[in-house]
Amino acid sequence: MADRAVSRRRVDSPVSQSDSSPDLVVEDDLVEWRRKYSLPPFVDLRVPTSEEHASSYVLGEIAIKKAFFDTGFRGVIPVLIASLYGFFEISPSQLNPPSWRLLVAIQNLDDLEHLSFGINEVLFSYHLAPLNGGEGRFHLRPRSGLPIVEELPKSDRKGSAFNKKWQERYVFTRLPRHSYRWNFVAGTHPAFPEGESTVLRARQLPLDRRQANFLLSNSVLHRSSLWGNMSEGTVNDPFAAYQEAAKVISAKKESARRGSASGTTSGDEVVITGSRQLVTVKMEPPSLAQTKKPQSGGIATRSSQQSAEATCSVGILATALSNLNLQVFPQDGTVLPPGEPSEVVHTLQWGLLRSPVASREELEDLKRQTSVERAQRLAREMEIRDLKDRVKDLERTAEVSSADALATGKRNSELEEAMGTLKLEMVMAVNGARVIGRWDLIREWFKGQSNQWDLVKALEQFKAVTLEEAKNKNAPLPTFEDEPAIPFVSRRPEGSSS
């Protein structure tokens, strides 16, 4: 009963219902996808059978949603996504396409800005949550409003990555080195504080450089480590071909020394493992490796067979060596010498040791250049700040000067008005004094008081004042020819009393 209940639960689960039909993906769809997404030849895709669904466990294979190709998947699991799957021990097909898109954008931001994103940074900004309560599917939900990259507004989200039926279109692809199983993650997980500093540094970048659409554009993907690893598994790797040829020659020589029979080498595989690449090379020697019967009809001897095989192996080695010199090592100036494989391997080792040193030197040069540019930018900013302060000071001075000029103008107007009033008062005072003085003289004359006048003295004073005024005004001196003569006796008017 318990087994039946569990079975019924799995059949009724959203996983089983939605994954039972892959929306009729057929071989023609695979051809179209290869053309549309320019998939490399090593990406091996197959259509699911009627009994398979996305949660099915097939050794060395995983289910890949069609929407994953729109987010940049080209046969290589992104490192950041693989880290998340490894941490929670889930399968890549359990994460929805928007979360794939988010993680690929973060990895591309890492490639562009060299910020070293890892699982700590992702889980500091996001947490893994069940998708709509669905059993076995998850998505990344931002924490506390601190997303690393900025996604489109909901009204602008279009395409297969945001299609509600994304789980219905999937195929299986081969990943020989990986074994993923569907698992269920219960509960929540805390944020990792170790990722805070890198996330905060990333959020200081301009917003347009953190947009998901920009980070998933073809121009960025072509410069990313994700598409840079698309050569994984190709059969046209010169270095792998050289190693295979050297391995074959060493085996031939060892076989010849032992005197044992040597078989025809075909279909060999060499796997080169690195931090992020898997290269599989298949060597198929030409028909010379298969010995022919001599024209005389006799059977080929062991020595002639070994000679032909050695000639073939040397030819393979020379071809591989030429490919390496032409296609790979011209980039760093390394030239592989012909001869024993040990000598070539020694040269390769020296080149590999030299490359990190050169890379470190280039990195140090870039750091120094960045420091100089940062210092120059800081100096320019300080200069601009000083100029702004100086402009503000000049503006304040201009405001004060304008206020002073306004006050001075007002005072000048008041002074001009006062001067005008003073001139009028002077005119009134002078002319009034003249009128009053004249009347005083006339009144004294009428009253018979003119005998008190000293006419001679008055005339002399008049002449002295007139001459002084003429000198002050630089005017011609008067001659006083028209002045009347002073009589000896002053007569009073008729009818005046004594």
Image (cartoon, rainbow, N blue to C red):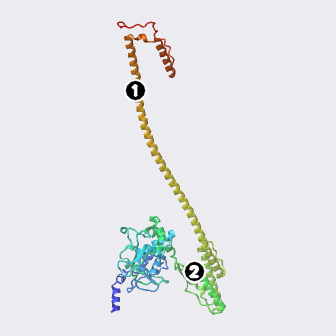
The quarter of the image holding the C terminus is top left
Q: Label 2 is placed on what type of residue?
A: Ala
Q: Is residue 101 above or below residue 497?
A: below
Observer-nearest of 127 and 172: 127
Q: Which mark is residue 240?
A: 2
Identify the image quadrant of residue 48: bottom left
Q: Is residue 344 left or right of residue 134?
A: right
Contact, mark 1 vs mark 2 (Cβ under 8 Å): no
Residue at image position (52%, 56%) is 382
Identify the image quadrant of residue 69: bottom left
Q: Secondary structure at mark 2?
A: helix
Identify the image quadrant of residue 153: bottom left
Q: Is residue 159 left or right of residue 334?
A: left
Image x and y of residue 308, in percent: 63, 86
Q: Is residue 443 above or below residue 130?
A: above
Q: Secondary structure at mark 1?
A: helix
Q: Label 1 is placed on what type of residue?
A: Glu
Image x and y of residue 107, in percent: 48, 73
Mark nearest the camera among 1 and 2 is 1
Q: Earlier in the sequence, mark 1 or mark 2?
A: 2
Q: Is residue 418 above or below residue 57?
A: above
Image x and y of residue 200, in percent: 47, 68
Task: Measure the alpha-carbon separation of dots 1 and 2.
Answer: 117 Å
Residue 400 in sight here: yes
Q: Residues within 10 Å of mark 1 (few under 14, many from 20)?
A: few
Observer-nearest of 373 and 108: 373
Observer-nearest of 283 and 287: 283
Residue for badge 1? 425
The quarter of the image holding the N terminus is bottom left
Image x and y of residue 483, in percent: 46, 12
Q: Which mark is residue 495?
A: none
Observer-nearest of 483 and 253: 483
